[in-house]
Amino acid sequence: MVDSLPPFPPGFQFGVSTAGYQIEGAVDEDGRGPSIWDTFSHTPGRTRDGDTGDVACDHYHRYAGDVALMAELGVDAYRFSVAWPRIQPDGSGPANAKGLDFYDRLVDALGERGIAALPTLFHWDLPQALEDGGGWLNRETALRFGDYVALVADRLGDRVRRWITLNEPVVHMAQGYAFGGHAPGRTLGLAALPVAHHQLLGHGLAVRALHDAGEVMITNNLTAVIADDPAAGMAYDAFHNRLFTDPVLLGEYPGFLADALGDVVRDGDLDIISTPMGALGVNYYNPTRVGAPAAAGAPLPFEIRPIDGVPTTAFGWPVVPSGLYELLTGLRDTYGDRLPPVYVTENGCSTDDVLDDRFRVDYLDGHLRAVHRAITDGVDVRGYFVWSLLDNFEWAEGYSQRFGLVRVDFETQERTPRSSYRWLRGVLAGRS
């Protein structure tokens, strides 16, 4: 068994994370409109075994029991996502009251248990009607996002004091629009870059819509870069990390990407995007090793290479806790006093479908120690959220990957806490 963790600072927030389409189910109830993930998952060949999120974990009906699991675990906060198609079935217009009612009930249930609500306002489930109009390639989607956020803030803002605007815009741009592995399944390559800008513009408009509703952050999938070639490393860091952090923290795009975006960026856009935030969210799973492309004339100035000699998750992702320390200290070194407080809003691993998930215990222990070390070395990290509370619909991988502290039987919906759940419960119970 792992040794006891060192103490975290007073007020450090421990939580768990989920996402709407991955757990809610109830895709055609109470006025919810179709999302791009409904369309994508029902398209043959798009997801493993043809799996869909139609039922998922049935959290829409079982949320009270899931909140009870969080309370027993002892977490301080719950990060979930609000499904835009529940609030505006067509992506615009007045709010669907029944959709807001669900999140009202969820936030109230959390509050009754002393658990802070941390809603993410966009976790990839864009209303299909907006995708039909161009999706995030269309600047209008950013404007619609600002309107939608205002509707949610008006209903929940009296009880929610911390918000996340976008989840992992780099993944949504790359997998959804550049390479086609996620919804909406476009394969535009570098022509997907406007998606980055329009997501960030939507973020800035959301920050302004939430100006009286508490602390706001964006959360991105960030990676420590292991560079076999310096130029390739700088290019990958720019595409994966700085494309989404420089604009919000510095008010500018990294050099060559600013040129690539060209006329997509209008006067005043970067002022909106860099509207001050209260915090920065970091999702970390693994570092990325890159080198110069082997083929002449390759479309990208880098290639991703394997990291040898380290354990891997069931997903095949390398397990390198020190990469999280390097990432957090690198953010501090890069942005200095422009860096707001940081929350690790996702960190976790998929394992085999077992209840005695010692691998996950070791994974979480190692990464929490990396966070503690970063705090000791001066990085203002204020929270850590495990991905995920529950096994769920893992996007294009369907139900084949198990990330949950709690096992879900997708036939019966029975929840069974794993060893990692009991371990984390002990960690949290032992806090002074």
Image (cartoon, rainbow, N blue to C red):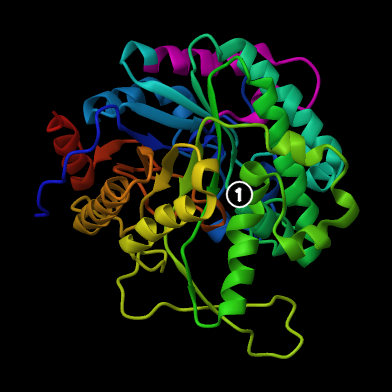
| Secondary element at image label 1 | helix
Can residue 34 be seen from the camera position used here?
A: no
Query: Does the image show residue 136?
Result: yes
Q: Is residue 258 left or right of residue 293?
A: right
When asked about the image quadrant of residue 2, the answer is bottom left
Q: Which residues are magenta?
A: 81-110
- Does residue 343 appear to the left or right of 215 in the view shown? left
Does residue 99 sit above or below 118 in this rendering?
above
* Residue 276 is covered by the magenta coloring: no
Left or right of 351, for residue 266: right
What residue would you read off at disc 1? 245
**Nearest the camera: 95 or 171?**
171
User: Residue 178 at x, y = what percent?
Assistant: 73, 62
**Residue 143 or 188: which is nearer the viewer?**
143
Residue at (69%, 59%) from the top-left corner? 254
Please state, as top left, top right, bottom left or bottom right, where the N terminus lies in the image: bottom left
Residue type highlighted by circle 1: Thr
Percent x, y of residue 322: 32, 62
Closer to the camera, 297 or 388? Answer: 297
Quadrant where the C terminus is found in the figure = top left
Q: How many marks?
A: 1
Circle 1: is it few (<14), some (14-19), or many (20+) Cα within 10 Å?
many
Is 92 magenta? The answer is yes
Residue 23: horizontal and vertical position, in percent?
A: 48, 37
Residue 18 on image: x %, y %: 45, 38
Q: Which secondary structure is most common in the magenta stretch?
A: helix
